[in-house]
Amino acid sequence: MEPGGHQGRHRLPGHRPDRRVLERRQHQDHLPEQSGTWAEAPLPTWGTPATGAVGGSAFALTKDTRKAKAAAEFALWATTDEAAVKSRLAAGTSSGLPAAENLRATAKESFDASFFGGQDIYEVAGSQVPLITSDWVWSPVHNSTSMTLQNELGKAQRSGEFWPAFQAGQRAAEKAITDRGLKLAP
């Protein structure tokens, strides 16, 4: 399994799942005056350090793909070649962490980290790869909770009040769980 891959799924070598790409880009686009004041940090853990795979990108070919060989060659190039990494990052819309460690230096050189005060975000994210657990599972109500949270965080960007968004996400999760006849942990 590739770092950040999902158990039971096969991935072509590629970019490690990283949901933070979208958030990074949103901050850069919507908060340009805060450039240089942001930093990336590992999520806190309690007990044994661990993290789950979130977001990312993958290439998949169906068995009836008409040009399977060409598609597979492209996917391999897009995920293992320095020129492909540079091209992806040149657009400025991605800061994806390559699964291939040898491409992380290329990614670092290709990504404008000025919004993060020049911090090596690839070192921070890369240090978390060994902590990705293979037994990670999502909540049975993850999608509906995420939709509520995203909507509420959108409102919070305008108001500046973020805590109510998280409270709404908590309420939505609890309701979705009990609506399914499941019990909440005490």
Image (spheres, helix red, strand yellow):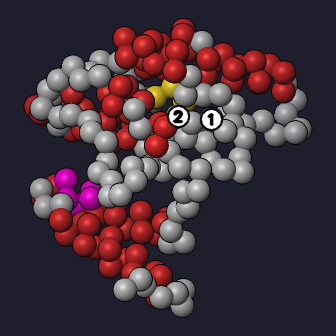
- Is any part of residue 113 visible from this angle? yes
Could you tell me if the residues under marks 2 and 1 are in contact, i.e. CB atoms within 8 Å?
A: yes
Q: Give residue 79's position: percent from left, percent from top.
A: 61, 22
**Number of numbered discs:** 2
Is 152 situated left or right of 78 in this image? left
Q: Give residue 97's position: percent from left, percent from top.
A: 46, 28
- List the residue tagged with mark 2: 16
Q: Quarter of the image containing the C terminus?
A: bottom left
Q: Give residue 145's position: percent from left, percent from top.
A: 42, 69
User: In the rendered structure, which disc, 2 or 1, sits on the residue that comes first in sequence?
Assistant: 1
Most common SS among magenta residues: helix
Label 2: how many residues lie within 10 Å, few (<14), some (14-19) or many (20+)? many
Name the residue at 49% across, 37% down: 130
- Is any part of residue 57 visible from this angle? no
From this view, report whether residue 128 is shown above or below residue 164: above
Q: Give residue 134's position: percent from left, percent from top.
A: 59, 50
2 or 1: mark nearer the eye:
1
Residue 2's tag is 1
Is 28 situated left or right of 159 in this image? right
Kind of residue sitting beneath label 2:
Arg
What is the magenta range? 153-157
- What is the residue that sits farthest to the top in this orientation? 83
What element does badge 2 sit on?
strand
From this view, report whether residue 166 is shown above or below residue 56: below
Name the residue at 31% across, 48% down: 43
From this view, report whether residue 48 is shown above or below residue 131: below
Label 1: how many residues lie within 10 Å, few (<14), some (14-19) or many (20+)? some
Residue 28's tag is none
